[in-house]
Image (cartoon, rainbow, N blue to C red):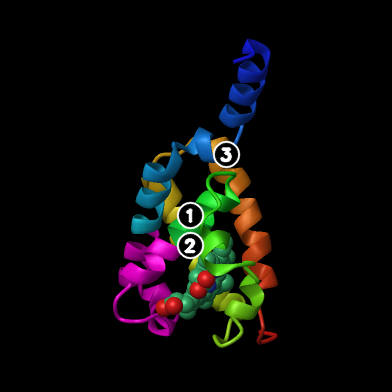
């Protein structure tokens, strides 16, 4: 194999957020912590109630989505097609309180799993934009 090509591929691979965060095991830890916070925090009880009693299926889906979103394997879109997250959330009333509850759970999950503060802040900024765009109730 051409060593120059290999080097270029390695540089690209190690520069994804997916690699920086620690790959799928790290994403799985974050998602486990995220749903544990959603399951237990009083300020998240309304959004918890929107979810099925068993969180295991949605955990799997969120892990695959976030892996892909961070630049990892494209298993989410291979299995479910275009994310179209706003449409997929249209059945759930999402206003500022629901957005903020989601973000609080994610912030706690990222803090708990110990990712570098600069990367955490960058991801939280991106999550804020996505979660805000998900609002569909005008509150
Ligand atoms: C803003 C507040 C949010 C609320 C209240 C919310 C709530 C929900 C609910 C109730 C489901 C369905 C769960 C089930 O099937 O039992 C869901 C699915 C999902 N959510 Fe959210 N969500 C929010 C924000 C976000 C954000 C910011 C992201 C991504 C960064 C996200 C990613 C997903 C994904 C990937 C799924 C699975 C979609 C699929 O079925 O393919 N959500 N969410």
Between marks 3 and 1 in the image, the one whose residue lies nearer the viewer: 3
Image coords of residue 139 (percent x, y): 66, 84
Q: Which residue is mark 1?
A: 107
Contact between labelled residues 1 and 2, with CB atoms less than 8 Å apart: yes
Binning the other alpha carbons within 10 Å of mark 2 as few (below 14), some (14 to 19) or many (20 upward) gives: some
Q: Indicate yes or no: mark 3 CB to ligand 1 under 8 Å.
A: no
Label 2: state its secondary structure. helix
Give whichever of 95, 63 is nearer the camera: 63
Image coords of residue 97 (percent x, y): 55, 77
Q: Which residue is mark 3?
A: 17
Rendered residue at 45%/40% (across/down): 23
The CA span between labels 2 and 1 is: 5 Å
Binning the other alpha carbons within 10 Å of mark 1 as few (below 14), some (14 to 19) or many (20 upward) gives: some
Q: Tell me if residue 122 comes above or below residue 85 in the rendering.
A: above
Between marks 2 and 3 in the image, the one whose residue lies nearer the viewer: 3
Query: Which residue, as the protein is rendered here, is positioned at the far front?
Result: 1
Image coords of residue 73 (percent x, y): 53, 47
Q: Which residue is mark 2?
A: 104
Instruction: Let me know if residue 100 appears in the view.
Output: no
The CA span between labels 3 and 1 is: 17 Å
Rendered residue at 67%/21% (across/down): 8
Q: Tell me if residue 46 comes above or below residue 29 in the rendering.
A: below
The CA span between labels 2 and 3 is: 21 Å
Instruction: Let me know if residue 68 appears in the view.
Output: yes
Number of numbered discs on residues: 3
Q: Disc 2 or 3, which lies upstream in sequence?
A: 3
Q: Main secondary structure of the magenta part?
A: helix
Q: Tell me if residue 47 comes above or below residue 23 in the rendering.
A: below
Label 1: state its secondary structure. helix
| Quadrant holding the N terminus | top right
Highlighted range, magenta: 34-61
Q: Quadrant of residue 43?
A: bottom left
């Amino acid at each position: 194999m051409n060593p120059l090509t290999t080097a270029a591929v390695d540089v690209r691979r190690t520069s994804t957020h997916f690699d920086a965060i620690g790959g799928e095991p790290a994403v799985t830890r974050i998602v486990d912590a995220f749903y544990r916070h959603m399951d237990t925090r009083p300020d998240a009880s309304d959004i918890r109630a929107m979810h099925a009693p068993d969180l295991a299926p949605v955990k799997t889906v969120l892990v695959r989505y976030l892996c892909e979103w961070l630049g990892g394997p494209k298993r989410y879109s291979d299995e479910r097609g275009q994310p179209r997250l706003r449409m997929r959330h249209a059945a759930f009333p999402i206003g500022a309180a629901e957005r903020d509850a989601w973000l609080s759970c994610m912030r706690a999950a990222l803090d708990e799993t110990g990712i570098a503060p600069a990367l955490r802040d960058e991801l939280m900024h991106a999550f804020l934009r996505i979660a805000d765009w998900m609002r569909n109730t005008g509150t």
